[in-house]
Image (tube, rainbow, N blue to C red):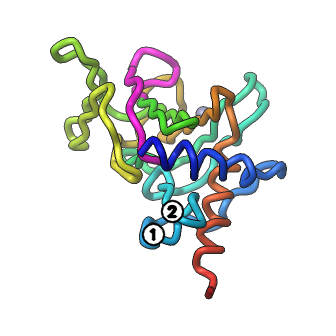
Amino acid sequence: MGGLLAVGFGEAVPRSLRQAALAFPEAQAEVQLADAQIARSSEPWVIASFPVENFQAYTSPYGYRGSGFHYGIDIAAPSGSYIRNWWEGRVVEVSDDSACGTSVIVESGDWTHVYCHMQGYVTTEQGRRVFVDGSGGVRIVEGQDLYTGDRIGRVGMTGRTTGPHLHWGMRYQGEWVDPGLVLQAMADGQRRASLPR
Ligand SMILES: [Zn+2]
């Protein structure tokens, strides 16, 4: 896992990031994993997972807004919609005591992805912090590994929020980046991978 991310994925990404401002995929509800073999060799973005099911709208972009800098994008979806892990990696933190609400942070090579405002709570079991969403059937232990596309929680309203949505944040080598650019690169990669060869 670490090798793929460090060599293939890590190097491919900066070149894929566009300088353009926010440009979101139009009707792209989810990037499928179907063509993973081709993807791993030439289109690393294709195997990434769109982070939420039942996409409704992007409700707040990355960047400055009235209340300050917004370190992520907001993706609206009906309360209870499942959130999916963007890229395989390790859970480095679960928490439920900040403005982010009940949240999971995953590390994938040089990337860190943050999921906020989820349903459920965090508890401690045998010295380990555990995120529990009982009715959603989700249980995530700090330190555990996740696959791309794993259901890691459900859209809720914990923390500071006025409506159900996923706040999705992303860091590359420690620096915040615009997740909208990542989604755009995923859409572009999928389109290229579907062209005849
Ligand atoms: Zn947000």
Q: Is residue 29 visible?
A: no
| Count of marks placed on residues | 2
Judge the density around disc 1: few (<14), some (14-19), many (≥20) Cα neighbours within 10 Å. Answer: few
**Observer-nearest residue: 157 or 62?**
62
Magenta region, residue range: 87-103
Amino acid under disc 1: Gln
Judge the density around disc 2: few (<14), some (14-19), many (≥20) Cα neighbours within 10 Å. Answer: some
Left of 141 or right of it: where is 86?
right
Residue at 57% x, 52% y: name it.
8
Q: What is the x, y in percent for residue 108?
A: 49, 39
- Quadrant of ligand 1 in image: top right
Residue at 74% x, 26% y: name it.
69
Quadrant in which the C terminus is drawn: bottom right
Residue 128's place in the image compared with 8, above or below, is above
**Observer-nearest residue: 49 or 22?**
49
Residue at 30% x, 21% y: name it.
122
- Numbered tag placed on residue 90 in the rendering: none
Is residue 108 magenta-colored? no
Q: What is the x, y in percent for residue 128?
A: 24, 17
Structural distance between the alpha carbons of marks 2 and 1: 5 Å
Q: Are the residues flagged by discs 2 and 1 in contact, CB closer than 8 Å?
A: yes
Left of 75 or right of it: where is 134?
left
Residue 131's place in the image compared with 150, above or below, is above
Amino acid under disc 2: Arg
Q: Which residue is mark 2?
A: 40
Q: What is the x, y in percent for residue 61?
A: 70, 42
- Numbered tag placed on residue 37 in the rendering: 1
Element class at badge 2: helix
Residue at 59% x, 41% y: name it.
74
Is residue 94 magenta-colored? yes
Left of 56 or right of it: where is 147?
left
Residue 46's place in the image compared with 38, above or below, is above
